[in-house]
Image (cartoon, rainbow, N blue to C red):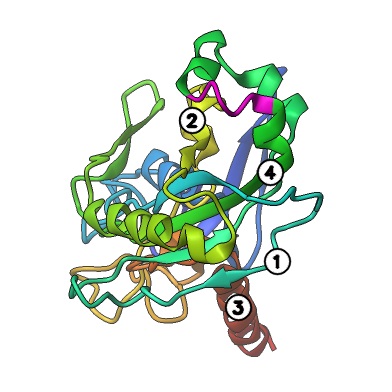
Amino acid sequence: MVTDAGGRSVTGVVATFEDGTTTTFSADVVVVACGAVNSAALLLRSATDAHPEGLANSSGVVGRYYMRHNNVAVMAVSVEPNPTRFQKTLAFNDWYLGADDWDYPLGGVQMLGKSDDAMIHAEAPRWAGKLSPDLPFEVIAHHAVDFWLCGEDLPRPENRVTVDKDLRVHLALDEDNNVEGVRRLRHKLDGMLSHLGMQHHRLLDHSLYLHKSMPVGATAHQAGTVRFGTDPASSALDPFCKAHDLDNLYVVDTSFFPSIGAVNPSLTAIANALRVGDHLVERLR
């Protein structure tokens, strides 16, 4: 992005195509929604003399406070076969804010898409079946009930997106970030299995067979790198997601989150985008 001479307004967005040609797009208002990683990267790559640390970054927070949730995918084994194909129909937050033995949030539990034997056979390492010889993968698949555990990770400034001199994106992430809550959440679910018609204490990690590593590009719940707030010294955006430092730049994806909670962020991002959209309609009248 390029700005006027004073650095107060974005005057264009420069796009470079595969053949090396460039085109500049201009508008009265520029709205960025590239995802928490790439929105931060775009602002950092757009540094100017007026904004040497990147656009909207006089506070130094752009790229910082990256969050992505503490997620665990697990599979229980039902006593009875589970023939359903579309099982992501239930969620519960009984321990979202804490538990009798833990005063801090644990997170939420929701159903996950159904595992099947073709998926397990395709992905499982050969040694994995030896871990449970009394339950072949075919049996596990026919009795599988899959759960997604989602816990909150904390907004820490050292968890951040940066851009090097060659404009490559780097992500620094402390993966040991508030993981005790989701560990306890798993223990709570494990203790409920026999009451839910599942085999007691047989909660298997999906990584047992979905063993391939997840790249940075798989961060579906990325959030927090261009946070909003009322104080320009500690936030990049105002409460309407307009950059404190520029008159016509807005950011409306999940990067505006100051914290992430322990629920999927999509509906919050959509609701906020609609809210900011109403604000922009009034501004552009």
Q: Which mark is residue 89?
A: 1
* Label 2 to label 1: alpha-carbon separation: 23 Å
* Label 2 to label 4: alpha-carbon separation: 18 Å
Q: Residues within 10 Å of mark 2 (few under 14, many from 20)?
A: some
Which residue has dot 4 on it?
143
- How many labels sit on residues? 4
Q: Position of residue 12 (x, y in %)?
A: 58, 51
11 displayed left or right of 142:
left
Q: Between tags 3 and 1, which lies in front?
A: 1
- Image point 37% across, 54% down: which residue? 186
User: What secondary structure is marked by label 2?
Assistant: helix
Predominant secondary structure, magenta span:
loop
User: What secondary structure is marked by label 4?
Assistant: helix
Q: Position of residue 81 (x, y in %)?
A: 74, 48
* Magenta stretch in the rendered image: 132-137
| Label 4 or label 1, whichever comes before in sequence order | 1
| Label 3 or label 1, whichever comes before in sequence order | 1
| Label 4 or label 3, whichever comes before in sequence order | 4
| Label 2 or label 4, whichever comes before in sequence order | 4
Specify the amino acid type for callout 1.
Thr
| Label 2 or label 1, whichever comes before in sequence order | 1
* Label 4 to label 3: alpha-carbon separation: 38 Å
Q: Between tags 4 and 1, which lies in front?
A: 4
Which residue has dot 3 on it?
271
User: What secondary structure is marked by label 1?
Assistant: loop
Specify the amino acid type for callout 2.
Ser
Which residue has dot 2 on it?
207
